[in-house]
Amino acid sequence: MMKILVTGGAGYIGSFMTKTLLDKGYEVTVFDNLERGHIEAIDKRAGFVKGDIRNDNDLEIVFKNKFDSVIHFAGLIAVGESEEEPDLYYQNNVVGSKKLFDTAYNTGKINKFIFSSSAAVYGNPVKIPIPEDHPKDPTSAYGRNKLEIEESLSRLKKDHPEVSFAALRYFNAAGATLDGLMGEEHVPETHIIPNVINSLLKDQAFSLFGDDYKTKDGTCVRDYIHVLDLVEAHLLALKKLNTNGAYFYNVGTGRGYSNNEVIKTVEKVSGRKVNVHVSSRRAGDTDELVADPSKIKTELGFVPKYSDLETIVRSAWIWHTKQN
């Protein structure tokens, strides 16, 4: 039975990953400091070690256990916050990740890693859809963090050729389980789908950050990937690591939706009208991010099953209505 360490397993994607790995017969330990995660989100079948990737002692303790690979989700994720607190983001995301990789290799003798990267590494794209070899020019501290972490893994592999890793560049993770029993709960919440839904459930106005982007309707365009599909991409990547290499994959659908289209879809699913208030742009946001997912489809056989916008929004609506 393969033993997997999931960092950030009390968070949104990490908790879904943990459950799926357990369902597939893996043995899972979650490592999380619970600053942004939720203890109740961790599957009770998993082991749990409370700790911080920035803390050398915490890392030494967790890697006294034996693991076959590390799936690294732990990190701060808000683009706007990363612009306001770049040092916090750098220390947590970049410095913490490097400590994690080095300790995992040197103490834990682990040479297989999957990293939760982001389309933010590309910045404002010069071509749409975006392939993996697209120029990297992040427009936010968050995007620069992700790129530096990828580079840390590349250096680790250069120094130790037996290391194998996959960096999965997520586009926009969204959605919940179809029965609404697991879903997205960030504090603070910065993602548009839960924020639109919560504005309806709390009878509040929704703040739309800018309507003057160079897109079809003036609002940002994003490629949304259902969290269940995203988790499946990690399972495929885990198998790929049996073949030594450094792998970079976009995880998206190749179809973009504007913020206005998201709002309209929430209105369709809920049967309610969203009260939209247009506010100023959010620092670090790019006009359009749409994946070219052909590489992951060809090399790993990845086929998204749940990532049409209506399925994403409907699952999120069920989850959030259960929470309110």
Image: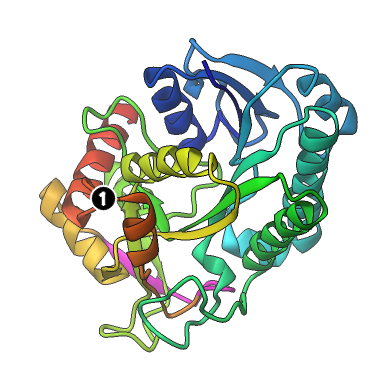
Q: Residue at x 43, y 54 (%)?
A: 191
Q: Is residue 301 rendered to the left or right of residue 272?
A: right
Q: Is residue 283 magenta?
A: yes
Q: Is residue 268 rendered to the left or right of residue 156?
A: left
Q: Position of residue 71 (x, y in %)?
A: 58, 37
Q: Position of residue 236 (x, y in %)?
A: 41, 42
Vertical order, 100 against 222 (above or below): above
Predominant secondary structure, magenta span? loop
Q: Residue at x 71, y 53 (%)?
A: 153
Q: Position of residue 321 (x, y in %)?
A: 26, 33
Pointer 1 residue: 304
**Can residue 293 be seen in this snapshot?**
no
Vertical order, 168 against 1 (above or below): below
* Quadrant of the rendered image containing residue 228: top left
Which residues lie in the magenta part?
Answer: 275-285
Q: Residue at x 36, y 40 (%)?
A: 232
Q: Is residue 303 rendered to the left or right of residue 113?
A: left
* Quadrant of the rendered image containing residue 84: bottom right
Vertical order, 226 against 47 (above or below): below
Instruction: Please identify the quadrant where the C terminus is shown.
Output: top left
Decide which of 146, 189 is in the foreground and name it: 146
Q: Residue at x 79, y 48 (%)?
A: 160
* Quadrant of the rendered image containing residue 144: bottom right
Q: Amino acid at mark 1?
A: Pro
Answer few, some or many: residues within 10 Å of disc 1's Cα (few below 14, many 20 plus, some between 14 and 19).
Answer: some
**Can residue 172 be seen in this snapshot?**
yes
Decide which of 184, 189 is in the foreground and name it: 184
